[in-house]
Image (cartoon, rainbow, N blue to C red):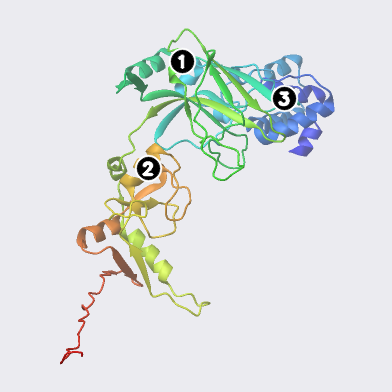
Amino acid sequence: LQDVVMSCRVSELRVLPGFVGRNKSGRKHELLTEALLESGCIPAIPMKIKELYRRRFSRKILTPSDLSMLHVQAGQLPPGTVAFLSQPIPFLSNIYFISGHKFGIIYSFYLIEPRVFHMFGLVKLSLVSSTNSQRFEEAHFTFALTPQQVQQILTSRDVLPGARCDHTTQVQLRFCLCETSCPQEDYFPPNLFVKVNGKLCPLPGYLPPSKNGAEPQRPNRPVNITPLARLSATVPNTIVVNWSSEFGRNYSLSAYLVKELAAGASKLRAKGIRNPDHSRALIKEKLTADPDSEVATTSLRVSLLCPLGKMRLTVPCRAVTCTHLQCFDAALYLQMNEKKPTWTCPVCDKVAPYDHLIIDGLFMEILNSCTDCDEIQFMEDGSWCPMRPKKEKPEVCQTSAFSGIEG
């Protein structure tokens, strides 16, 4: 791809920034550098580069009208030009995105979504990187709600104790690192300030530092901006973001219309219980003798107590990505993540999002048939037996009888 970019003419290089709404002027070496950087960040750019290459070497001469057709904004692309824009979420055609930022729009599907929310895009994932050597940066964004979305928010209003009101359908703002190599978690830029429609948006409070001298940090999570949003289909909403620039580190911002979904254990049950044979196969795999090992494991002990609450399991679950047999209680795990969403397995400390949780059918059978013990032992063939504590015989303390009286 780099060789193709290097062979492009200036007129073709100017097509690429115009394709995503950026400044098309500049010298050839500047346009080359920008094209190479964009090709690694914006999925649509490599496709456009290949398209230009095919046009150039298909013995078809590009006319001025052909080039003018390429200078379209990202929101005006012909159907099918870019795969991920040809089938947008239905209401996105009514959403307006205006960026006063030099870097324009960057699309990405790499932001991790909270598993208890159903999400719709209002402002697509957009770069908010440093534009110069200034210490503080500022970026402007605008979005509008459709009449249907306004109605969804208004009808979801819920009055809470203390005359406070909340909405189960919300407009949420999210930040993450601009990194496309892997899925990204929420991550706030340093010294972040957000204004929505001219009003300062409250952000999560700083956590107390874990050790002396450490900088206090905010818990990274979505920000509910519904109370500051204009619930109108005719008046747009503005977002102004200020943050401290960091050399070599860029950030992305997005806004979503979300609907809070109940993530109770009953919904997890509705997904179905995993066949017990899956766990039996995992047990046999773990207890299969390794020919290279001198020590063979013939049994495996597992607790029936939840590692979170130290209480007996009621709905045993774990993530499909977990390799251990130990389960945790689904109801308690969901309750804890409702208050503080970390979605981390309490057994192996790996990511265990809601969509990856399964209820273990074998453990359900064991809990129903064995009610008087808190630990079991699995055998090589997948069978199990309860591990009940042995009753200790009470010690009988014998006292020696004294005859006579000390004088």
Q: The C terminus is located in which quarter?
A: bottom left
**Amino acid found under the numbered disc labelled 3:** Thr
**Amino acid found under the numbered disc labelled 2:** Met
Say what secondary structure mark 2 lies in. Answer: helix
The residues bearing labels 3 and 1 have C-alpha atoms spaced at a distance of 29 Å
Q: Which residue is mark 1?
A: 145
Residue 219, horizontal then vertical, whole percent: 51, 36
Residue 260, horizontal then vertical, whole percent: 37, 30
Q: Are marks 3 and 1 in contact (CB under 8 Å)?
A: no
Tag of residue 131: 3
Q: Nearer the viewer, mark 1 or mark 2?
A: 2
Q: Nearer the viewer, mark 3 or mark 1?
A: 3
Instruction: Specify which label sits upstream in the sequence, 3 or 1.
Output: 3
Q: Are marks 3 and 2 in contact (CB under 8 Å)?
A: no
**Label 3: how many residues lie within 10 Å, few (<14), some (14-19) or many (20+)?**
few
Horizontal placement of 307 versus 394: left or right?
Answer: right
Q: Nearer the viewer, mark 3 or mark 2?
A: 2
Q: Hey, which residue is sitting farthest bottom in the picture? A: 404
Q: The N terminus is located in which quarter?
A: top right
Tag of residue 336: 2
Horizontal placement of 18 versus 141: left or right?
Answer: right
Instruction: Specify which label sits upstream in the sequence, 1 or 2.
Output: 1
Q: Hey, which residue is sitting farthest front in the picture? A: 407
The residues bearing labels 3 and 2 have C-alpha atoms spaced at a distance of 40 Å
